[in-house]
Image (spheres, grey):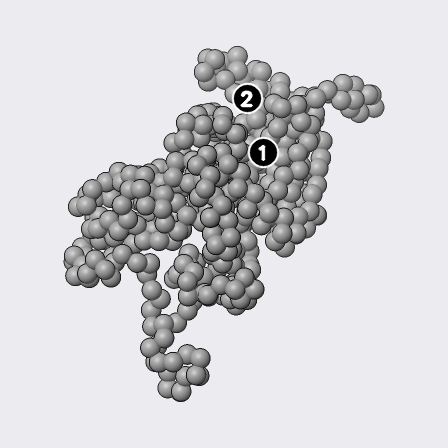
Amino acid sequence: MAQFVMPQLGADMTAGKLLAWRKKVGDPVKRGDIIADVETDKADIEVEVFSAGVIEKFLVQPGEKVPVGTPLAIIRQEGAAETTESPKELTGPASPAPATPLAVPLPPTAPLGTPRLHISPAAKKLAAHYGLDPASITGTGPGGRITLQDVERAEQAKTVQPEIEGQPDRQARMRHAIALAMARSKREIPHYYLSTTIEMTRSLAWIAQANLKRSVEERLVYGVLLLKAVALALRETSELNSKWSDGKVIPNADVHVGVAISLRGGGLVAPALHHADRLSVDELMKNFRDLVQRARAGSLRSSELSDPTITVTSLGEQGVEAVFGVIYPPQVALVGFGKIVERPWSSEGQIVSRPVVTATLSADHRVSDGHRGALFLAAIDRRLQEPDTL
């Protein structure tokens, strides 16, 4: 059996409201199928399933709001017999397995029959600081382990959720969610910041030439070259394509570039362009257009919100020349781009006017240092000077 649980769609999400089931009891499902629609403080999300099998039972009904990690459905894997557990046994969050009996007496604080609590030492210390009972926290780590992030979510839900419930406007709730995530980021992550100026003559000339062969609907924008350059540069400085979780760095095998997208009603989301380093520029442009349209229409998938391994933000269209962003945990880096401007530039011993863009890096000093961050920005610059290789 497999449990389909309320997913965590971003570090700022503590709970979600089930809007609708897309499947029925008895329906077969495979990895990647849309199984439900969930409402978060930022958007309505199409949630994918990551286990193949047959839906045996729904544990939560549309309209119910439950914490992250709460089981929503039971999925019987292919070949498995139907469960004989009672509905009561299935409706609550999974309990940790009892500890294996030991050959030595247990201390008085752990009487026989007490379930073993899977919690990291750092998370246990933080829970004590907040005055939280670890047994009341739902663990989302491997094997149901309670992580630092789980403790943070429990504290946020305790202190902030009553205020949010009284605000029916999603825009207000989104601002609360963003505030929580950014406050956590600035509190926990030791940021360092770097910037560089990149000359864009070759990239802009390449875009203009390439667009002569394309229809209006298929034309490229220079932003897609920036995204591809970032994705390829991550191959050379892979530590920036990691996440920090439970007190340690965890490398990401794939490059999923999160793109900061402003929403029409205000606020923003940063869904992932999956495998951005493997896509051609045309494929990346097509996926980027689709992502922006669906983000503003409120039809993103859960994997697009949970998978980003780094975030790219650009305020060039708003006239900003440089942006130093705040890292979105558990990511460890954020890249910012400003608008392209004409500036004096030294070329072959002469001062000429050239189009340039300011690229910035906000990075987590627990994972990388300024030297590696500088190499990353240099790699982006080098890629943009060779646009035909992107």
Q: Residues within 10 Å of mark 1 (few under 14, many from 20)?
A: many
Where is residue 67? Give x, y as percent: 39, 51
Residue 200 appears anywhere in the view: no
Q: Is residue 252 left or right of residue 26?
A: right
Tell me the element at label 1. strand
The one of 86 and 54 positioned closer to us in this rendering: 86
Q: Residues within 10 Å of mark 2 (few under 14, many from 20)?
A: few
The location of residue 333, given as percent across then percent down, is 60, 44
Is residue 252 placed above or below 37 in the rendered structure? below
Q: Is residue 230 above or below residue 92?
A: above
| Quadrant in the picture for the C terminus | top right
Number of marks drawn = 2
Front residue of 40/290: it is 40
Q: Position of residue 230 (x, y in %)?
A: 58, 36
- Give the secondary structure at mark 2: loop
Q: Residue at x 60, y 47 (%)?
A: 183
**Residue 60, x across and y down, in percent:** 28, 48
Q: Are marks 1 and 2 in contact (CB under 8 Å)?
A: no
Name the N-terminal-most of marks 1 and 2. Answer: 2
Judge whether 27 appears above or below 125 on screen: above
Residue 284 left/right relative to 353:
left
Type of amino acid under label 1: Thr
Question: Which corner quadrant of the image does residue 98 belong to?
Answer: bottom left
Q: Which mark is residue 313?
A: 1
For marks 1 and 2, give the CA distance: 15 Å
Q: Residue at x 55, y 46 (%)?
A: 180
Q: Residue furthest bottom?
A: 104
Residue 318 visible to an observer of this rendering: yes
Q: Nearer the viewer, mark 1 or mark 2?
A: 1
Amino acid type at circle 2 is: Val
Q: Which mark is residue 221?
A: 2
